[in-house]
Image (tube, rainbow, N blue to C red):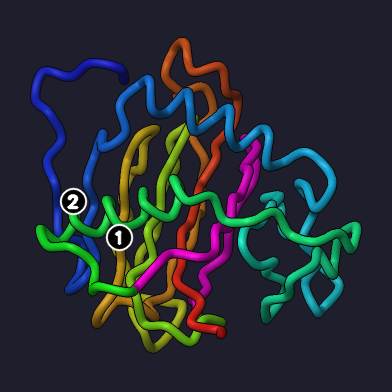
């Protein structure tokens, strides 16, 4: 998994959806992992998300900038310990801009700043059902970064949770950006691949860092 005969290539998955493999190098992955561990500590730390129907998401989550809950945003961890949300780090916002430039070959529109981060931790048996990132008012691209174990990432269409969709293997260090016609496409994680994290990273499981522009004022 760490070294391959042929490098994986940047791939357009759908209009506006781009997969950039191995975008984060080993050192940057380790730095980001340590930052995630700090952000996950209380207050407003890692919590289990409960759905309106009474179920629980198997991936646990911590938020920065604004706190996401089904289905809206708040300045405090309203479905957690109620504490104020940790601020969005400037370096993480800049990483979002860098990701858009790497995926699309051009910079993000001037004045658009990433101000929300959702960090999901997946254990080996965690899943994420098909859903849309539709609680933001901004149409800016979503930037997704992967750390740790690989996963099957299912990227679908705007109209339904079913086909057509495409399954993509996301590995540690991979970048996935979706915007434009794909901004409101359904997507999910049907499977995590335990034991596939890079040696030396020091993570069992998968972390997904999703960067968004809220446009919420």
**Mark sitting on residue 177:** 1
Which percent across, then down, holds residue 10?
14, 47
Pointer 1 local density, CA inside 10 Å: few below 14, some 14–19, many at least 20: many
CB atoms of marks 1 and 2 within 8 Å: yes
Residue 139 position by quadrant: bottom left
**Label 2 element class:** helix
In the image, residue 200 sits, relative to residue 52, either above or below, namely above
Q: Is residue 47 left or right of residue 64?
A: right
Q: Is residue 63 magenta?
A: no
Residue 58 in percent (x, y) is at: 71, 52
Quadrant housing residue 1 = top left
Q: Which residue is mark 2?
A: 102
Where, quadrant-wise, is the C terminus in this rendering? bottom right
Q: Which residues are magenta?
A: 112-133
- Residue 122 falls within the magenta-colored stretch: yes
Q: Is residue 164 visible?
A: no
Q: Residue at x 15, y 60 (%)?
A: 12
Q: Which of the pair 143/166 is nearer the observer?
A: 143
């Amino acid at each position: 998994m760490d070294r391959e005969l042929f490098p994986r290539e940047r791939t357009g998955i759908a209009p506006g959806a781009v997969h950039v493999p191995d975008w984060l190098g080993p050192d940057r992955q380790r730095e980001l992992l340590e930052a995630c561990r700090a952000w996950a500590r209380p207050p407003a730390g890692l919590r289990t998300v409960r759905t309106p129907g009474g179920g629980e998401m198997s991936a646990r989550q911590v938020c920065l900038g604004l706190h996401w809950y089904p289905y809206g945003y708040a300045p405090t961890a309203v479905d957690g310990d109620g504490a104020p949300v940790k601020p969005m780090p400037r370096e993480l916002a800049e990483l979002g801009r860098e990701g858009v430039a790497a995926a699309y070959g051009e910079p993000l529109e001037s004045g658009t700043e990433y101000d929300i981060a959702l960090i999901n931790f997946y254990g080996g048996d965690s899943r994420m059902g098909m859903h849309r990132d539709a609680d933001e008012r901004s149409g800016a691209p979503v930037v997704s970064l992967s750390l740790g174990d690989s996963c099957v990432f299912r990227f679908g269409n705007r109209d339904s949770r079913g086909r057509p969709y495409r399954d993509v293997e996301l590995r540690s260090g991979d970048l996935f950006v979706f915007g434009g016609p794909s901004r409101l496409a359904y997507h999910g994680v049907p499977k995590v691949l335990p034991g596939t994290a890079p040696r030396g990273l020091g993570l069992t499981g998968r972390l997904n860092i999703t960067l968004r522009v809220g446009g919420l004022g």
